[in-house]
Image (cartoon, coloured by chain):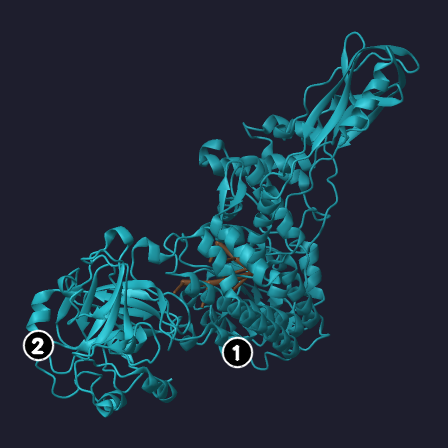
Chain colours: A cyan, B brown
DNA sequence: GCAAGGTC
């Protein structure tokens, strides 16, 4: 006997389909951890009796990912994600779905695919075929593999589908492949880049992951748009009239509603006031209806759970899922809100009538059963209906509320409409019309069971008669102000997402949950969505750089291109290549302009620098580097994946100075107030830019010709103690000034309290040291004559003698007047100094030579 | 650690 393997999208469907197709004769058997296989024998097409095996997958078998080496955030530039290789991996390796399918396919020569009839289902068809291709021969042949097309899980539809088997549609499957690839590349590239850029940069960012996605970002965009509308709202004053007339007195509203000009309203008021009576222009009465609800689909369930029960969509769907697996309700993920033609509505009512909670209503409705409204049949699953009766005590509070709502909603759909009578009275005086309506309930209809929608109290009907006159008791003018809209409710957001095709019924709750968990929005009382500072800053940032990134149309345009693939009118590869190219360009533009988003972050968040951690910007990528204090102390740039060793001691950002060679922010090193200190560039410290600058040294060993922090600018004299060192003015702790040897531990404190100390271009005629200029504030002068500013030699000038730590100055000698000393050891600079050969202590070559240096080095 | 889509 031939064996036919059939595969459904989920275990529950496999069971239903098997029951229908086998006329209840199928025998279930445990498959893998989550799926069962149902077996029976029966007729297959015109090919006689065969053995059927009906099993299922659990949604997608495979998911797309980058090959593993591109999953390193540190080693991969996100832009590479637009072109790097991808691979399909099993969604849930524990399920071993592929080997399960292959095992079930053994001995089968025919495959019938019963996956959901949408593009995703079509894609899963090919995942199934791929999994069994080595077991079922020629699985891609139309003589081997068939596709069942069904639009409802009813006997008629399912058996009809079996009669008219078709073939899987590769184009539709490909369009899903394209969607997966685009979502993966775009989402991950932007997410990684943003996260790495902002991470560690601000101390009070309350999200460790700054994600971007073609669904979640526009969803956030809706919330921020409403926030902006509220912020930008300018209230306007308006004026309106009301008339009080008759006995008993009724209040009538002005037919003009609101008028935005006070003068005009006043003028009209005065016209009316000229009259003592008003004419009853008309009294009309008509019946009006409020329609009963349509059958329940997922999106409506989520909306009402949110707005009516205060249960968010994510939680609502978790509850619905549990109710479904326990058999209390039908499958809860469906777009269809119209009952199938042969749906047994009475049977469902019959289930509900014994209820102690709503049995009375159920019985009343059963005896007055109404045809349900028409709606949309999306061809997926029947609407959500009760399947089994439950008592309140069986569930926790929220589960019961969701279940009860589903039951009452179902009964509402087969109830009468609500009917009421509207009476409208129109009065006229001085040319102005006023009216009053009153509503009186005729038939509560479905609100008898959906009690939360109950009609308000009946309103009194004015006893006015058409054509008669009524006394005007008063006419008054009031002022009002237009108000801003309120924040978006979750229910409204769900509607917007549905309208713009952002996400699906199954993924809408996930996207909303995402933007909450990432701290982009908060849900406040009334389930209103209030964007956080982070959410607002992100959306405003996108709007500054590339507004399309946050527009809902971005998704729909991609969907449109994908539809072309699905219809076969566009080539899969061409569409994909084109879309990837566009988004790569968008991404690169985004990266180039990220600073305009960063400006918003800077305004709203505190840079880590302020929250006490010492760290500074990398000169290559402009991002803050991480300061790792554990030895060896170092700066780590996550973007560039580079480490920069630091000297042991205190390291602080040195104001906002940058190294002119590499753009890294300068740091100030010190070993305490009295200890050594010098500025340094973390890059040059590790990679000296000049041959004569030793490794692991600061700016006081750097021979840059013009940098204000270099040895050449701040060097004063040869060291008083060591052979090779030069004393360099250290400005990092001003107004505590000192001369620090760039080789040994000699430190000479000097000019304490001076506001400014600069090294001049002149050398001391006696000792050869560079002359310095010292400035004190007027009232704080430390000079003996009280003057504010003096120029002289640190060692020889009498004006300075008492301002320079003497023991050092004295200890240092006049002695070494032998050869020129100091200057950077080795290399050209040393040679230059030597060449200059003037002797003395100054280690600094004259400026004219520096121009040569500049030409040589820089 | 990232997207969105299935489903549990």
Callout 1 secondary element: loop
- Residue most extreme to the top: A247
Q: In which quarter of the image is residue A617?
A: bottom left
Q: Nearer the viewer, residue A798 or A316?
A: A798
Quadrant position of the C terminus of chain A in the picture: bottom left
- Residue most extreme to the front: A785
Count of numbered marks:
2
Q: Which of A38 and A406 is in front in this view?
A: A406
Q: Which of marks 1 and 2 is in front?
A: 2
The residue identified by callout 1 is A83
Residue A276 is left or right of residue A96, and the answer is: right
Residue A35 is left or right of residue A231, and the answer is: left
* First of labels 1, 2 by sequence position: 1
Quadrant position of the N terminus of chain A in the picture: bottom right
Callout 2 secondary element: loop
Q: Nearer the viewer, residue A99 or A299?
A: A299
The residue identified by callout 2 is A813
Which x, y percent locates residue A496? 64, 49
Which x, y percent locates residue A588? 54, 72
A272 up-or-down from A794: above or below? above
- Residue most extreme to the right: A467
| Residue drawn at 22 percent across, 73 percent down | A728
Which x, y percent locates residue A247? 79, 7
Which x, y percent locates residue A785? 20, 57
Q: Is residue A806 visible?
A: yes
């Amino acid at each position: 006997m031939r064996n036919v393997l059939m595969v459904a999208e989920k275990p529950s469907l496999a069971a239903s389909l098997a029951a229908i197709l086998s006329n209840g004769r199928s025998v279930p058997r445990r498959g893998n951890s989550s799926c069962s296989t149902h077996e029976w024998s029966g007729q297959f097409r015109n090919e006689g009796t065969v053995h059927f095996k009906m099993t299922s997958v659990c949604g997608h078998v495979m998911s797309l990912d980058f090959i593993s080496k591109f999953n390193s955030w540190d080693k991969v530039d996100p832009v590479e994600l637009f072109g790097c290789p991808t691979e399909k991996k099993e969604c849930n390796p524990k399920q071993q779905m592929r080997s399960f399918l292959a095992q079930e396919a053994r001995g089968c020569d025919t495959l019938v695919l019963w996956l959901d009839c949408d593009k995703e289902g079509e894609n899963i068809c090919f995942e199934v075929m791929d999994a069994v291709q080595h077991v079922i021969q020629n699985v891609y042949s139309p003589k081997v593999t068939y596709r069942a097309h069904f639009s409802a899980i009813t006997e008629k539809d399912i058996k009809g589908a079996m009669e008219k088997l078709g073939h899987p549609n590769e184009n539709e499957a490909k369009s899903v492949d394209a969607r997966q690839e685009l979502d993966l590349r775009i989402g991950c590239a932007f997410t990684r880049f943003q996260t790495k850029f902002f991470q560690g940069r601000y101390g009070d960012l309350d999200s460790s992951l700054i994600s971007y996605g073609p669904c979640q970002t526009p969803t956030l965009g809706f919330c921020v748009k409403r926030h902006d509308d509220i912020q930008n709202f300018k209230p306007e004053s308006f004026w309106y009239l009301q008339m009080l007339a008759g006995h008993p007195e009724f209040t009538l509203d002005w037919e003009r509603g609101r008028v935005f000009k006070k003068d005009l309203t006043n003028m009209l008021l005065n016209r009316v006031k000229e009259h003592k009576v008003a004419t009853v222009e008309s009294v009309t009465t008509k019946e009006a209806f409020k329609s009963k609800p349509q059958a329940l689909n997922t999106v409506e369930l989520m909306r009402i759970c949110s707005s009516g029960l205060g249960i968010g969509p994510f939680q609502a769907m978790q509850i619905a899922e549990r109710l479904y697996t326990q058999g209390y309700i039908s499958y809860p993920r469906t777009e269809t809100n119209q009952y199938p033609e042969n749906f047994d509505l009475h049977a469902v009512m019959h289930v509900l009538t014994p209820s102690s909670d709503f049995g009375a209503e159920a019985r009343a409705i059963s005896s007055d059963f109404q045809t349900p409204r028409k709606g949309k049949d999306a061809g997926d699953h029947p609407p959500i209906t009760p399947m089994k009766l439950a008592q309140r005590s069986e569930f926790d509070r929220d589960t019961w509320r969701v279940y009860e709502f589903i039951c009452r909603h179902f009964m509402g759909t087969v109830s009468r409409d609500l009917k009421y009578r509207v009476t409208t009275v129109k009065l006229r005086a001085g040319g102005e019309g006023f009216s009053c309506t009153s509503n009186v309930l005729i038939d509560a209809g479905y609100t008898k069971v959906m009690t939360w929608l109950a009609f308000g109290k009946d309103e009194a009907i004015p006893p006015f008669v058409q054509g008669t006159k009524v006394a005007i008791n008063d006419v008054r003018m009031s002022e009002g102000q237009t108000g801003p809209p309120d924040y978006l409710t979750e229910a409204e957001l769900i509607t917007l997402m549905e309208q713009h095709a952002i996400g699906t019924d199954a993924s809408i709750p996930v996207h909303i949950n995402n933007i909450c968990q990432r701290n982009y929005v908060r849900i406040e009382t009334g389930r209103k969505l209030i964007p956080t500072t982070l959410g607002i800053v992100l959306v405003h940032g996108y709007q500054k750089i590339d507004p399309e990134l946050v527009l809902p149309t971005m998704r729909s345009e991609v969907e449109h291109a994908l539809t072309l693939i699905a219809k076969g009118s566009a080539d899969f590869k061409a569409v994909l290549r084109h879309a990837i190219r566009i988004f790569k360009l968008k991404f690169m533009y985004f990266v180039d302009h990220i600073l305009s988003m960063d400006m918003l972050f800077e305004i709203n968040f505190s840079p880590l620098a302020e929250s006490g951690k010492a760290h500074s910007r990398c000169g290559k990528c402009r991002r803050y580097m991480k300061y790792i204090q554990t030895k060896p102390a170092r700066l780590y740039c996550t973007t560039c994946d580079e480490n920069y060793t630091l000297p042991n001691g205190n390291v602080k950002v040195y104001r906002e100075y940058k190294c002119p060679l590499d753009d890294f922010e300068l740091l100030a090193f010190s070993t305490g107030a009295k200890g050594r200190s010098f500025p340094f560039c973390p890059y040059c410290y590790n990679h000296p830019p000049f041959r004569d600058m030793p490794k692991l040294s600061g700016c006081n060993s750097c021979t840059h010709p013009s940098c204000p922090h270099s040895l050449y600018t701040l060097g004063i004299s040869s060291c008083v103690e060591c052979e090779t060192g030069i004393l360099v003015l250290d400005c990092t702790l001003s107004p505590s000034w000192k001369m620090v040897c760039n080789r040994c531990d000699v430190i000479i404190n000097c000019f304490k309290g001076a506001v400014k100390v600069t090294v001049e271009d002149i050398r001391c005629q006696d000792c050869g040291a560079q002359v310095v200029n010292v400035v004190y504030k007027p009232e704080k002068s430390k000079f003996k004559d009280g003057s504010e500013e003096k120029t002289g030699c640190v060692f020889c000038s009498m004006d300075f003698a008492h301002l320079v730590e003497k023991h050092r100055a004295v200890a240092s000698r006049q002695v070494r007047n032998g050869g020129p000393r100091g200057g950077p050891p080795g290399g050209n600079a040393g040679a230059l100094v030597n060449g200059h050969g003037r002797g003395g202590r100054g280690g600094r070559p004259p400026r004219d030579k520096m121009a040569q240096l500049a030409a040589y080095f820089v």
